[in-house]
Image (cartoon, rainbow, N blue to C red):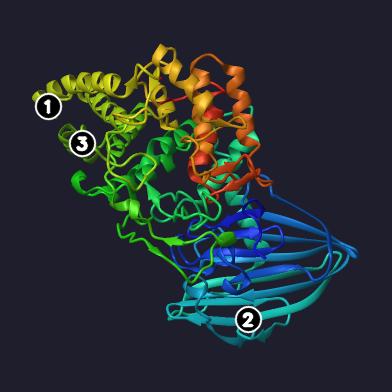
């Protein structure tokens, strides 16, 4: 039986990542890239779809685990009737072949162990060809070769590798699974102790660059490390999550693929990195944006692959039965074809944040900014898809038009005296900024309801409205904003957490959206409600699993995470809110 979402930890090397269950089974791995097909897909089915188990062969009385401090090295300890054993899991942070290292160490007594490796390429469907080699086994399927180096004798059994062995106190047995192209030589044997030491050193050196201090330091550091585990070392692109196909609604169809890079996350990402002191990573993210967009904002997508390429054709993968039967499992993401007006404002806002942090606007940035704002001038009042990517008819969404105002306003403020920019454009944009602001206040605010609404002509609340004061559209103490926050507290909160939209009449509801609770905490801070802000942040931190990972959503009713994990936007919310509540920071609204 597949483990629950909350039972997984992540390991990674900046090229890919794997999910490791408390049981000792690696149940999800896309190799050799984040968005490659999975060769372990038991997370979305069962062991038949690929996994790698190393665990005690008999009864386990207790299992505990942790990350080594300030690293992504996972340690899991199992207590049995005969002893205690530790399994250390990591992916080496090096320039060699991408690999998974698993080190089994006897802590006390003697423990009988078992390992079972079942590789299934093509998202759990393709059985590879296997052959023995002097140190273990080699598996090949099309372009992929996976080599298992093992410290114990392996049996090739029905296309899988199995072994039983025992470990006593101070015994150390290493297993290394490495990926290489099937046309290339097999990768060299790793010095496991040296690799673990070097990887831990690299992680500690990186997180040691953290410049900010806050009252939630442990959670802040873990979230930053998690964010780096989702970052492509080659391109600088950052995946929205490690996984695809995990349900937002148990048993329902909302099982999306989040292994891609969303432009909307850009300003959230930049404020987190810059306020934490990671300017180099912020610049790499900006450079990724510039490469991905290219030269014409009219053809810009809202989401890209991590290398900046654009093909994300979505299809339903019927061969996987889904996490706890939630189907269809979706691969690719059709949201890439949506037009979402807020994204243009997000980009202009992100360039403004970078400039205020001291990162110079290059001529390429200015050229792109100008092209974006001219495009925005033409389309700002057109219907579009919303921030949540609902697959219904386009509408004039309040948040989308607020972000159009943000984009225009930021551009004017940055370039009002810039001789490179046409004066007539600046004059038109100043007027347009006033027009958009007035339009949103008239069409996006319901005098009958007494709060801002999701879209023009509607009356529903939506958690994206919490972002209005955060981007500086209106002050947090403006009565219209205060009343909107109060309405969200009354109508969109469940168990002290924020839902992004109202409960559905059919009862098929997603969970609370974790990032939205962070946005509400930010609003509390802006309203001077510091104690409530801290309490809400601590409630969010309490949603993390035992190793500090957050999913996209949380079911208050079932007390369990929902959606893909770990979710970058949830961790970004935690990072930004923890820093905002702890002292002066660079804010989207200025300051």
Between the residue at mark 1 and the residue at mark 3, the CA separation in whole angstroms equals 20 Å
Q: Secondary structure at mark 1?
A: helix
| Residue matched to label 1 | 425
Q: Is residue 71 above or below residue 180?
A: above
Give the mark nearest the N terminus, 1 or 2. 2
**Dot 1 surroundings within 10 Å: few (below 14), some, or many (20 or more)?**
some
| Residue matched to label 2 | 160
As rendered, which of 199 and 545 lies closer to the eye? 545
In this image, 537 relative to 34: left or right?
A: right
Q: Do the residues bearing badges 1 and 2 touch, measured as CB atoms within 8 Å?
A: no
In this image, 262 relative to 553: left or right?
A: left
How far from the left and from the top, in percent, is residue 252? 50, 54
Q: Residue at x 14, y 29 (%)?
A: 420
Q: Secondary structure at mark 3?
A: loop
In this image, 548 relative to 441: left or right?
A: right
In which quadrant is the N terminus drawn?
A: bottom right
Q: In this view of the protein, can residue 584 be seen by the observer?
A: no
How far from the left and from the top, in percent, is residue 248? 51, 49
Q: How many marks?
A: 3
How far from the left and from the top, in percent, is residue 304? 34, 53
Give the mark nearest the N terminus, 2 or 3. 2
In which quadrant is the C terminus drawn?
A: top left
Between the residue at mark 2 and the residue at mark 3, the CA separation in whole angstroms equals 56 Å
Q: Residue at x 13, y 21 (%)?
A: 427
Which mark identifies residue 382?
3
Q: Do the residues bearing badges 1 and 3 touch, measured as CB atoms within 8 Å?
A: no
Place residue 588 in its image quadrant: top left
């Amino acid at each position: 039986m597949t483990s629950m979402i909350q039972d997984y930890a992540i390991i990674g090397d900046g090229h890919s990542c794997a999910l490791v269950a408390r049981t000792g089974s690696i149940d999800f791995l896309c190799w050799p890239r984040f968005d490659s097909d999975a060769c372990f897909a038991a997370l979305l089915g069962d062991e038949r779809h690929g996994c790698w188990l190393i665990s005690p062969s008999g009864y386990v009385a207790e299992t505990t685990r942790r990350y080594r401090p300030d690293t992504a090295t996972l340690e899991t300890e199992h207590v049995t009737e005969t002893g205690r054993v530790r399994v250390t899991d990591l992916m080496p942070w090096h320039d060699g072949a991408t690999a998974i290292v698993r080190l089994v160490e006897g802590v006390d007594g003697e423990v009988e162990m078992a390992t079972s490796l079942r590789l299934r390429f093509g998202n759990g469907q393709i059985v590879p060809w296997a052959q023995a080699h002097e140190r273990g086994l080699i598996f090949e399927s099309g372009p992929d070769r996976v080599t298992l180096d093992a410290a114990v004798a392996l049996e090739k059994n029905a296309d899988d590798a199995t072994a039983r062995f025992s470990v006593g106190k101070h015994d150390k047995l290493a297993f290394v699974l490495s990926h290489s192209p099937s046309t290339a030589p097999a990768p060299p044997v790793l010095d496991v102790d040296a690799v673990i030491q070097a990887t831990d050193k690299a992680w500690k050196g990186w997180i040691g660059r953290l410049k900010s201090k806050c009252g939630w330091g442990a959670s802040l550091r873990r979230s930053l490390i998690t964010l780096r585990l989702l970052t492509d070392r080659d391109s600088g692109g950052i995946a929205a999550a490690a996984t695809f196909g995990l349900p937002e609604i148990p048993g329902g169809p909302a099982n999306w693929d989040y292994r891609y890079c969303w432009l909307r996350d850009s300003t959230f990402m930049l404020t987190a990195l810059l306020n934490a002191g990671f300017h180099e990573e912020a610049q790499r993210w900006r450079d990724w944006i510039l490469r991905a967009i290219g030269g014409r904002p009219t053809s810009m997508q809202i989401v890209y692959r991590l290398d900046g390429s654009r093909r994300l054709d979505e299809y339903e993968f019927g061969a996987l039965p889904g996490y706890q039967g939630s189907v269809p499992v979706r691969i690719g993401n059709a949201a890439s074809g949506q037009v979402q007006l807020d994204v243009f404002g997000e980009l202009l806002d992100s360039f403004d944040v970078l400039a205020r942090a001291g990162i110079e606007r290059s001529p390429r940035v200015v050229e792109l900014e100008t092209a974006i704002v001219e495009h925005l001038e033409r389309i700002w009042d057109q219907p579009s898809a919303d921030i949540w990517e609902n697959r219904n008819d386009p509408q004039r969404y309040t948040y989308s038009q607020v972000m159009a105002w943000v984009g225009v306003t930021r551009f004017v403020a940055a370039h009002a005296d810039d001789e490179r920019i046409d004066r007539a454009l600046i004059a038109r944009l100043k007027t347009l900024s006033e027009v958009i602001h007035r339009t949103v206040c008239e069409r996006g605010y319901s005098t009958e309801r007494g709060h801002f609404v999701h879209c023009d002509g509607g009356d529903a609340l939506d958690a994206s409205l919490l972002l209005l004061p955060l981007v500086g559209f209106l002050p947090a103490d403006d009565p219209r904003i205060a009343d909107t926050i109060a309405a969200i507290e009354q109508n969109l909160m469940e168990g002290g957490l924020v839902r992004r939209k109202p409960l559905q009449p059919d009862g098929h509801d997603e969970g609370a959206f974790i990032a939205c609770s962070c946005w509400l905490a930010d609003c509390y801070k802006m309203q001077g409600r510091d104690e409530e802000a801290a309490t809400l942040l601590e409630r969010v931190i309490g949603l993390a699993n035992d190793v500090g990972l957050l999913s996209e959503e949380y079911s208050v009713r079932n007390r369990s995470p929902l959606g893909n994990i770990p979710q970058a936007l949830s961790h970004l919310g935690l990072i930004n809110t923890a820093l905002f509540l702890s002292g002066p920071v660079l804010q989207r609204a200025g300051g």
